[in-house]
Image: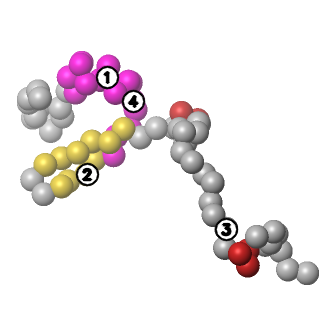
Amino acid sequence: MEAVKISPKFQVVIPKRLREALKLSPGQKLQVVAYGNRIEMIPLRKISEMKGFLKEIDTTVEREPDREGASGFHK
C-alpha cells in the first residue's frame, strides 16, 4: 500500500507501480466512487479493449422443454 498527498487543487498522483500494473495512460478516464470513508477509482476501458474478455465463460444454457426449438418469432 502506498500513500499519496492531495495537492491544493485536490489532485493526486497515482504511483508508477500502480499505473504500470493497471496499464493506465495519460488522459484515461477513471470512475470515482465513495464507499463509506474511502475512495475507489475504477479504470474505464474502451469497448474495443473488452473484446474477448468473456471467452473463457461457459455460455451453455439448459433450455426449458417448452422452449427447445422455439425461434422466438410468432407467425
Q: Which residue is mark 1?
A: 21
Q: Nearer the viewer, mark 2 or mark 4?
A: 2
Q: Earlier in the sequence, mark 2 or mark 3?
A: 2
State the CA–CA distance, disc 4 to disc 3. Answer: 45 Å
- Image vertical order of residue 17 relative to residue 67, above or below: above
Q: Nearer the viewer, mark 2 or mark 1?
A: 1
- Which mark is on residue 27? 4
Q: Which residue is mark 3?
A: 63
- The crowd level at tag 4 (other Cα within 10 Å; few <14, some 14-19, many 20+) is few
Q: Which residues are magenta?
A: 14-31
State the CA–CA distance, disc 2 to disc 1. Answer: 20 Å
- The crowd level at tag 3 (other Cα within 10 Å; few <14, some 14-19, many 20+) is few
Q: Quadrant of residue 26?
A: top left
- Image vertical order of residue 33 relative to residue 51, above or below: below
The amino acid type of the residue labelled 3 equals: Arg
Q: Which residue is mark 2?
A: 33
Q: Secondary structure at mark 4?
A: loop
Residue at 25% across, 24% down: 18
Q: Earlier in the sequence, mark 1 or mark 3?
A: 1
Instruction: Quadrant for the C terminus, please.
Output: bottom right
State the CA–CA distance, disc 1 to disc 3. Answer: 41 Å
Q: Earlier in the sequence, mark 4 or mark 1?
A: 1
Q: Which of the colour schemes (rainbow, by chain, secondary structure, one colour) is used?
A: secondary structure
User: Residue 16 at what x, y percent from top left?
Assistant: 24, 18
Q: Earlier in the sequence, mark 2 or mark 1?
A: 1
Instruction: Quadrant for the N terminus, please.
Output: top left
The amino acid type of the residue labelled 1 equals: Ala
Residue at 24% across, 19% down: 17
User: Residue 32 at what x, y percent from top left?
Assistant: 28, 47
